[in-house]
Image (cartoon, rainbow, N blue to C red):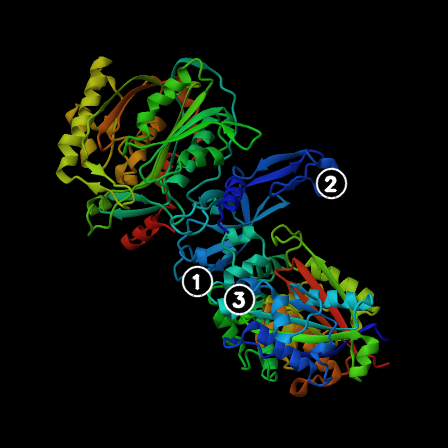
Amino acid sequence: MSSEPVERRVSYVLDKLRGSKCACCGSEYSTPVDYCRDCGRESFGKMQEINYFFQKGKLEVCALVEEPTNRFTKLAPFLHGTVSFGDKIRFPGRITDMIIGDEPIDLSKFEGREVVPRFRRRYSVKSHEVIPTISLAFTFADEYYPYQNYEIRKPKKEYEKPGIVGFGVYTSKFRIKEGNIERSVPFLDEDAITAAVEAGKMVLIQSGVDNTDIGKIYVGSESNPYAVKPIASKVAQVLDLGKKEDVGVRGVDAVDTEFACKAATSMFKDAAALVSYPKSKIDYALVIGSDNSQAAPRNEKGGELDFSVGYGAGAFLFGKKDVIAEIEGWYSCTSDTPDFWRRDSEPHPMHGGRFTGDPAYFKHVRHTTKKLMSELNLQPKDIKYFIAHQPNVQFPVRIAKELGFKEEQFSPGLKVSKFGNAYSGSSPIGLAATLEIANPYERILIASYGSGAGSDAYSLITTPQITEIKNRQKFTVQHQAENPFLEFVDYNTYRRLKLGI
Amino acid sequence: MISDVAIIDAGRTTFGELYETEPQKLVEQAFLDTSKKSGISRYDLKACFLSTYFLPLTNKIGAQEGFASHVMGIHVPMDPSRSFSSALSNAYNAIKAGRYDLVLVGGVEKMTDRWDKIKDDLMLLEDPISYYTGATPETNHELMLREYVKKHSIQGESFEDFNKALAHIAVKNHSNATKNENAQYRRKISVENVLEARGRRSLGTYDFAPISDGASAILLASSKVAKEYTDKPVYVYGLASATDDVSHQARDDRIGFLSTRLAIENALKMAETDKEKINLLELSDKSTMLEMISLEDLGFAERGKAWLDILKSCESGKGCYEINGKKLFVNMDGGLKANGNPLGASGGAQIYEIVKQLRGEAGERQVKEEMKYGLVSEIEGFGFKSNVTILGVDNE
């Protein structure tokens, strides 16, 4: 069941839960059908596509699967059940994000509860095969991941300068806690692709931007499970980005970028430039940084990273309408400094030890921040919040202090002790955290860092419209950082989950 | 009443893990068993109707007819189908139409040859989306159980009784199988064994029919020809099948099978009888849940009440079900649970049991009550197709 055409068709339908609705009588079908069973011939050509991906379901009944079919071995034990969407539509589904131990299980505790469809890996396949995905994985709406409706809103105001229109962050509900550091750990069926989709989904929910108006998507990652095949194409398909064309494609440009941890931030200026270019016809461009940050086990070469790696994604939508933070200016720099790298087909990156500090991180972050501040004629006191890339807790604090920032300026965006280093998602998550608390007309300065090496610094100024979006997102960075449903796992479980299926 | 089509005899192999025997040899054994008494030669056969679900998968045999021809050395028309009931239906139609007057209906399955993959293979009989979401061949049985207890508000002590009632079904079937020399499991089990094996799940190992190898066969003839070979023909009075959405979730009624309810209605119509006259049943107990639900779907028990009837009957130790004052002899051979469930041959073994019982040839497990009709219910997959066959002897 994993031939490429079968895989492509199944993913196309079930990643988005595409169904059909009869324009004649309104009957709904859980899968795409050509005609309505009640209306027959009359309904040919009149079936409309609907989808259940942004709807909430209800777990009607469930069963515990302990001895699964072969491809589900690594996921077991898990709950499988019947999920209904309204009175007529029902799907089989797997409950995900649930580690089931040896404890007794009362199925009636789960039945009757609302669930949210989640985009996940479907099951294990061989490492050379296409990764099968599905959104018939569900989590309970009354736990970590709340149900949120995606409502498209008409933009109110056009700006002269481009800027951020919306943002979203996704981290998983699992954490490993060592000392004072908590780090986000993916569930078995999660990876950089699923996190990118989730972050993109959060942007749509918060901004209310019409997904078909998004003309370009960039996904920056250094843990794409594919060496060749973009994450961005999957995000575009699941979230239906760009205009639908009748030959089975969408009018969106999708591309993955790679520059270690600055793969996403590097594209902020490209996205902003694109939406500003008068002939581009692109109203919105989406940039996502997503990583299931890789690290070798502690006793192996490169294992020092295993103390700091996290999992998560940050997404930013750029445009000129209903802007919440305008881009005031930017500066980027690059030098060929291999302080952290991963050779093709190697599973884990190598870490340059003492070379990663002064000649790498500090030199580049210091330079971009100073240069941008001098170009814009800024002093630290002119800046409300400062965010630097966060490979660990020490580096961003040291550089912030060295550059003259006070704790109240850099600590709101310092999230590494909550989520770990989400690589490409690291400084974007910090930026999102400050945008959540920022008020109108505040200046935010972000300086990312990517090994290899380079840094991007941006100065942003919030607009009055930032207050409008504050209540539109329940799944905030704050919600994800402090949540009663977080589940803490031990080291061995963390390694197993990170490895995935 | 005499039907135009009759069974001359039925035969079978032992069910279980028959790892030393090739599938075509199993068909041969079943044929030899079914023709032993009548002395019918393979050269007398006008056609063969063969059933198997998974030989192409389990044994990489896609040319079943070629293998049957190879084993038997005959060149008559042969048609493969999936279930034994389907093969029987095709054979019945051909005889009724006057094309043939004596045919072999044979079924075989060799599931243990693919032990490590058979669970995945079995999902071919269910909605692929179920498979994509981690369902196993057992999951839908457990989901139906949950829907059943929810719908009928079976809670607390009643829920415990309900669980016990289902356990009794397995205990009864295992007990019946001790008297069946061909059964896969010929040992008694207790209610505690069944409950314990469930662990944290709604149903457990002892609730489900096993993975089996085996073959079964019947000789089907026009009634005229049948009488030349046997003085005890068993007539095919009614047979019907019905289908339903492959997705259990998509069905409006998820605590029973519409396909079974439609099939029994049409089979009874064809047989021109009513179910009051039927007291011998071979049900598709792929799980204890399905034996119970079949009693309801076939109309022998009231919906939502079968478990109460089962519990009462089994706790009084009568060895049969007693529902509304009527005795029902169900799965006297041990059912799919203990007799074994080699899919393509299972329906044949069910017919085998009815033939033996109606003729009074069932030995130790012979039902002593008077019986005129026997009913076979064969459910394919999780109810995407249901077959009901009504057999009988002319004792008027």
Nearer mark to the viewer, of 2 and 1: 2
Quarter assignment of residue A386 = top left
Q: What element carries label 3?
A: loop
In percent of the image, x 46 and y 32: which residue is there? A236
Residue B329 x, y percent position in the rendering: 69, 77
Q: In this view, does A406 lie to the left or right of A113?
A: left
Q: What element carries label 1?
A: loop
Task: Give the number of the disc on residue A40.
Answer: 2
Task: Give the number of the disc on residue B59.
Answer: 3
Q: Is mark 2 on a helix, strand or loop?
A: loop
- Amino acid type, callout 1: Pro
In three-dimensional space, the C-alpha distance between marks 1 and 3, rounded to whole angstroms, equals: 40 Å
Nearer mark to the viewer, of 1 and 3: 3
Marks 2 and 3 share the same chain: no
In three-dimensional space, the C-alpha distance between marks 2 and 1, rounded to whole angstroms, equals: 49 Å
Residue beneath disc 1? A104
- Check if mark 2's residue and mark 1's residue have beta carbons within 8 Å: no
